[in-house]
Amino acid sequence: MATELATQSARAPFKLGLKQVHLPTFSISLHHTPHLSPSYAQFSVPLWFSKLDLRDYLYNAYAVRCVSIRSYIKLQRLTQGSPTGLNGESNPRPQYKRWHRPRSLKRMTVELESPFVWPEELGREVLDEKFDKGQMERATRGQEEMQKGMGSDGDTVVDETRRRRMREQAKELLEGRSKWKPVADQAFGRISGR
């Protein structure tokens, strides 16, 4: 151990501490379960996870003590279609006579030593005040309109403001209030008329 620290400190541009940091290589998700009492919590865990792993993880990461742990594996239904398409992505379309069972899910229900109560959901007024949800909705609508114009049927979408500006410009040209000027010749990088 001492020789290991000595070799690491020779390479590091700063003084190394003795505290070891272990980062998990898995993900655990806590489920919102209103049907359970506050002294129970339910988690989705990897299939290889044991009750002792979850107990140690909760204690070391969050200082949460567990009284008991129940686990079960939920089998997924048989579905038609190939499990993965090209390049490893899932195939959204069912394929005839190709049945497979998706990967099972493992859930663990933990009885906690002290109850955990979920915070109340924020109301619409609080969301608008703190996070400006209205601006987010306007941005989402703008993106949807832009994507609609850039899609496969984008040439059928009519931009009314552009149409009105072109109509006004054509009217000014016909009445002689403005004069037409050629645009730069893009193919040869020079302005036409020189």
Image: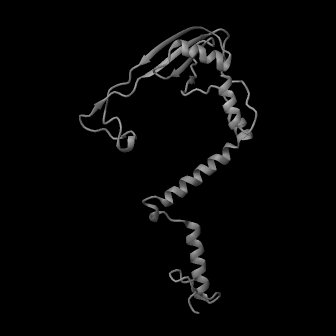
The answer to whether one can see residue 119 in this image is no
Q: Residue furthest front?
A: 3
Asked where in the image residue 47 lies, by quadrant, the reply is: top left
Question: What residue lies at 54% left-to-right and 56% top-to-bottom?
Answer: 145
| Front position in the image: 26 or 83 | 26
Quarter of the image where one finds residue 56:
top right
Q: Residue furthest right?
A: 15
- Which residue is situated farthest in the bottom direction here? 194
Q: Which of the pair 48/120 is nearer the observer?
A: 48
Query: Could you tell me if residue 29 is visible in this image?
Result: yes
Question: Relative to the observer, which residue lies in front, 55 or 181?
Answer: 55
Vertical relation: 23 (above or below) 68: below
Q: What colour scheme was applied to this rendering of the protein?
A: one colour
Above or below, 17 against 139 in this view is above
Pick the residue in front: 53 or 117: 53
Q: Locate residue 104 relative to residue 190 in the image: left or right.
A: left
Figure disc tally: 0
Q: Position of residue 100 (x, y in %)?
A: 31, 29
Where in the figure is residue 132, as x and y percent of width and height? 70, 43
76 on left or right of 191: left
| Displayed quadrant of residue 168 | bottom right
Residue lying farthest to the top in this orientation = 67
Q: Residue at x 34, y 27 (%)?
A: 101
* Residue 39: image location, x then y, percent: 63, 11
The residue at 46%/58% (across/down) is: 151
Considering the image in quadrants, where does the C terminus appear?
A: bottom right
Q: Quarter holding the N terminus?
A: top right
